[in-house]
């Protein structure tokens, strides 16, 4: 299922009705039009539980309620609950979401993203320099993880020596989403990492208050909602968590999936090498076909009927982006990568409407620059493994390759 979830989505779309998924305690929507309708109706469908019942906050809630939870883990879980009680961005509904988004929009304007391109290109070349002479590399660990991690760390003012720790924190926050079977040891490690993150950025916030710089953290501290109300400490920490996760995992998956598609289809690779204008087109098609975030959750604010099914008020709804992006009614030849695809339907890899991903321009920039750098520095790239041996993360929410061994010539 993790490797090819699309085989399961097709029959669900044909059924046309929301399907109750006991394991995630949600009604799954798989059709493009139904999902877009929910995304465009924030007054009827709340984003309060956007990461779903398997994410870190619900896990913390269960730990606090369990009398068998040890004192240290209980304290860490309670801290998570206290901080996550502050509703920001991903979990905020209008009008609060609209006001908060205006505070951080300036960090993601087209002009600022364009200005990042030279530094992102230097980063891509530096990463390639480390292994280009070897003739082989494992793309995920040696490139796809490091590129977006470095970019978001720089945006947040995290120094290079902290980057490995920064990545470990990101992994911890993501571990609670999409996996419903974490063991006791993994849960303890997860909350230890969450605590470290909070401690580190609590100190950095205090430092930036005294000595502001030009990074996003300083901008968040100085921001004022409606021109007068500053963000609270917990709101800032919650916002930083979202930037950390969004700026890391999805772009790692995208870079790797684009390369896997290229090395698996020699004709496509040749076409892209011959015409680099196709690189952004391929990126959009891979976003659609191999959607990094397979879905997101909403909560019904009222009783609603979708596809003939009555969904009670308060129910979780899982919007399966990965299915919508292959919906036959929204896309011609939905399972094919087409370099001539018109915009007959916009993919949902970055969402739509009020909560369209803030970092989409940066993800697209990193993917375009990263793939072009590989093509510039090599004459041939091939998979250094059996395609059937490529493993994916065991997650229903994330679609990501764990390792991608490559062989290349320069």
Image (spheres, rainbow, N blue to C red):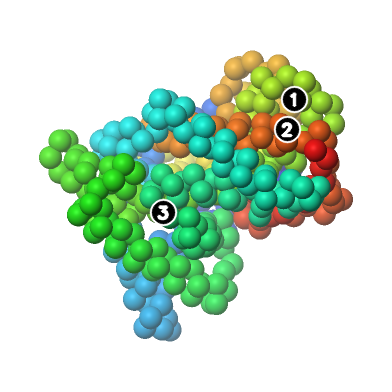
Contact between marks 1 and 2 (CB within 8 A): the answer is yes
- Identity of the residue drawn at 33% across and 32% down: 106
Where disc 2 sits, the SS reads helix
- Identity of the residue drawn at 27% across and 37% down: 103
Mark earlier in primary sequence (3, 2): 3
Mark earlier in primary sequence (1, 2): 1
In front of the other: label 1 or label 3?
Answer: 3
Of 336 and 403, the residue lying toward us? 403
Where disc 1 sits, the SS reads helix
Q: Tag on residue 375?
A: 2
Where is mark 3, residue-wise? 158
377 w.r.t. 338: above or below: below
- Where does residue 3 sit, x and y in percent of width and height? 73, 49
- Identity of the residue drawn at 31% across and 42% down: 214
- Where does residue 401 sit, x and y in percent of width and height? 69, 50
In front of the other: label 1 or label 2?
Answer: 2
In space, the residues marked 3 and 2 are separated at their CA atoms by: 30 Å
Numbered circles on residues, count: 3
Where is mark 1, residue-wise? 272
């Amino acid at each position: 299922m993790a490797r090819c979830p699309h085989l399961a989505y097709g029959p669900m779309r044909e059924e046309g009705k929301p399907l109750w998924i006991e394991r995630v305690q949600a009604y799954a929507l798989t059709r493009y039009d139904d999902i877009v309708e929910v995304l465009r109706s924030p007054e009827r469908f709340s984003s309060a539980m956007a990461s779903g019942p398997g994410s870190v906050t619900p896990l913390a809630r269960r730990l606090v309620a369990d009398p068998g939870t040890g004192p240290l883990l209980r304290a860490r879980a309670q801290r998570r609950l206290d901080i996550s009680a502050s509703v920001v961005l991903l979990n905020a509904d209008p009008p609060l979401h609209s006001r908060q988004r205006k505070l951080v929009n300036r960090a993601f304007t087209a002009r600022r993203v364009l200005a990042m391109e030279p530094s992102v290109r230097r980063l891509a070349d530096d990463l390639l320099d480390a292994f280009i002479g070897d003739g082989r590399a494992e793309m995920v660990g040696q490139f796809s993880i490091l590129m977006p991690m470095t970019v978001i760390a720089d945006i947040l003012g995290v120094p290079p020596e902290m980057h490995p720790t920064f990545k470990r924190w990101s992994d911890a926050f993501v571990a609670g989403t999409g996996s419903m079977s974490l063991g006791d040891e993994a849960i303890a490690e997860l909350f230890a990492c969450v605590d470290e993150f909070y401690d580190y950025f609590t100190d950095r916030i205090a430092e930036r208050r005294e000595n502001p710089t030009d990074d996003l953290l300083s901008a968040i501290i100085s921001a004022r909602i409606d021109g007068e109300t500053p963000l609270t400490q917990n709101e800032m920490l919650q916002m930083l968590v979202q930037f950390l996760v969004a700026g890391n995992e999805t772009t790692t998956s995208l870079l790797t999936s684009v390369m896997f598609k290229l090395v698996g289809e020699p004709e496509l690779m040749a076409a892209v090498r011959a015409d680099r204008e196709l690189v952004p087109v391929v990126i959009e098609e891979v976003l659609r076909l191999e959607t990094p975030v397979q879905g997101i959750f909403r909560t019904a604010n009222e009783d609603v009927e979708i596809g003939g099914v009555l969904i009670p008020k308060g129910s979780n709804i899982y919007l399966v982006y990965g299915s919508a992006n292959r919906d036959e009614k929204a896309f011609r030849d939905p399972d094919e990568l087409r370099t001539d695809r018109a915009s007959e339907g916009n993919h949902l890899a970055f969402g739509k409407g009020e909560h369209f991903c803030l970092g989409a321009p940066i993800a697209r920039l990193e993917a375009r620059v990263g793939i072009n750098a590989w093509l510039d520095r090599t004459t041939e790239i091939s998979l250094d493994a059996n395609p059937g041996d490529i493993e994916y993360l065991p997650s229903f929410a994330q679609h990501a390759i764990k390792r991608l061994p490559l062989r290349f010539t320069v």
